[in-house]
Image (cartoon, rainbow, N blue to C red):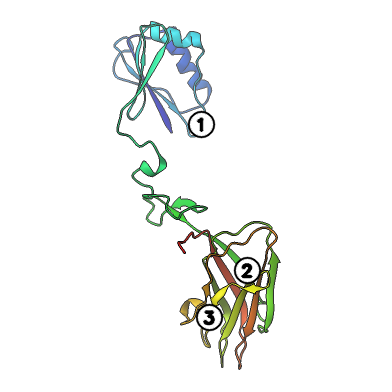
Amino acid sequence: MARVEIQVDQNTNAIQTLIDQAKQLNELPVLSVGVGIQDADLFLLRIASTGQTVSCTAEQVTALFSSGVNQIIAGANITVTPSGGTGNVTITAASGGATSFLGLTDTPANYTLKQGQNVKVNTSANGVEFTPDYKDFELSAENTGIQTGTSYSLICNRPFKFVNEFVFSVNTAPTGSSIIIDVRKNGTSIMTQLANIEAGEKSTSTSATPGAVDKPINFNIGDSLAFRVTQVGSSLPGAGMRCTMIYNVPYVV
């Protein structure tokens, strides 16, 4: 909610027009603070979160400054003052305030290795942070045993930059042996370590060999992305496999 504070020496037609305009916008009520409008009361024109503002013509502005308004407070560290009663306005900002996004007190310290990332409120709800992107893939049916071979492939219709990690999971754990998955770009493996879902486990996140990407990896429009299962559980193959690709994680190589 924005707030405009107008300090006046007397009630003038121009000021009343401004107040009436605010009321017509169905905003929050105009409040008179102090005693006696003739004694330099303080008016609060409260503009609701709709973004609507009270507009004045040049003639109204001139009338305001020539007939009683001696100060408009536009916000913290900003002062708007009339100039000689002519209707001209001087806007003065106090020095020392933030001049950039990173200069704020509740934002990250720098942009280093943050290109392509998102800005969102942090888990403590007291500031913002940069976060990567995630893309989920369904690689097999929920109740059908996983089979070896290419389980899912696609042609990228948008870029995926700075691919950092693939996390695999299943709804039904394999038994007897692990599930092993390779990830390929345009037919060539991009893994320095194939991903393993170990026997009795349901995710690569609990594996001693969760898989590693041969960085840097970028998928451009038209590139193929394929997941190839090279091994399944020897007793129970496992079922319901998913993958989460984590990208937009710039790194130094």
The residue tagged with tag 1: helix, strand or loop? loop
Front: mark 3 or 2: 2
Rounded to the nearest angstrom, the CA distance separating label 3 from label 1 is 49 Å
Picture residue at 52% right of the left edge, 26% below the top: 26
Rounded to the nearest angstrom, the CA distance separating label 2 from label 1 is 40 Å
Which residue position is annotated with label 1?
Answer: 51
* Mark 3 / mark 2, whichever is N-terminal: 2
Which residue position is annotated with label 2?
Answer: 137
Relative to residue 27, is residue 174 drawn left or right?
Answer: right
Relative to residue 61, is residue 76 drawn left or right?
Answer: left
What percent of the width, then of the height, locates residue 178? 56, 87
Looking at the rendered structure, the kind of residue marked 2 is: Phe
The relative height of residue 65 versus residue 139 in the rendered view (above or below) is above
* Mark 2 / mark 1, whichever is N-terminal: 1
The residue tagged with tag 3: helix, strand or loop? loop
For the residues bearing labels 2 and 1, Cβ distance under 8 angstroms = no
- Which corner quadrant of the image does residue 5 belong to? top left
What percent of the width, then of the height, locates residue 225? 66, 68
* Mark 3 / mark 1, whichever is N-terminal: 1
Determine crowd level at label 1: few under 14, some 14-19, many 20+ residues with C-alpha closer than 10 A: few
Q: Which mark is residue 76?
A: none
The residue tagged with tag 2: helix, strand or loop? strand
Determine crowd level at label 2: few under 14, some 14-19, many 20+ residues with C-alpha closer than 10 A: some
Rounded to the nearest angstrom, the CA distance separating label 3 from label 2 is 16 Å
